[in-house]
Image (tube, helix red, strand yellow):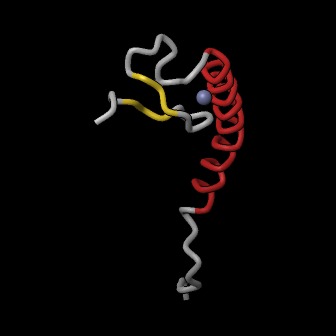
Amino acid sequence: MPAPTIRCPICGKEVAFDDPNMPFCSDRCRLLDLGNWAAEKYVISAPARSNELEERDDTPEPPEGRSR
Ligand SMILES: [Zn+2]
């Protein structure tokens, strides 16, 4: 059996457990992941709020027209 490795989440390359860049295969992939993470966080935080507000606004009014 080969030495235990993990997959780089960026490029899928196998990375040794004692690699200093773990879990990334290289410093480049680590920076890329940081960038992705920051971008995702930024993208999520903006629409998530308006989504929550919309959902809250929608909840008190059920689609059933059963008030009569
Ligand atoms: Zn990589």
Quarter holding the N terminus is top left
Residue found at the very far top of the displayed protein: 20
Q: Quadrant of residue 34?
A: top right
Placement of 3 over or under 51, stated as above or below: above
Q: Quadrant of ligand 1?
A: top right
Q: Residue at x 64, y 43 (%)?
A: 48
Residue found at the very far bottom of the displayed protein: 68
Where residue 32 sits: x, y (%)?
68, 24
Q: Front-most of 68 and 53? A: 53
Residue found at the very far front of the displayed protein: 1
Left or right placement of residue 20 versus residue 27 in this view: left
Where residue 56 sits: x, y (%)?
57, 53
Left or right placement of residue 46 versus residue 52 in this view: right
Where residue 63 sits: x, y (%)?
59, 78
Q: Residue at x 47, y 10 (%)?
A: 20
Where residue 43 sits: x, y (%)?
71, 37
Q: Residue at x 64, y 24 (%)?
A: 29
Quarter holding the C terminus is bottom right
Left or right placement of residue 38 versus residue 4 in this view: right
Question: How many labels, in total?
Answer: 0
Q: Quadrant of residue 67?
A: bottom right
Q: Residue at x 53, y 31 (%)?
A: 8
Left or right placement of residue 59 versus residue 44 in this view: left
Q: Front-most of 45 and 12? A: 12
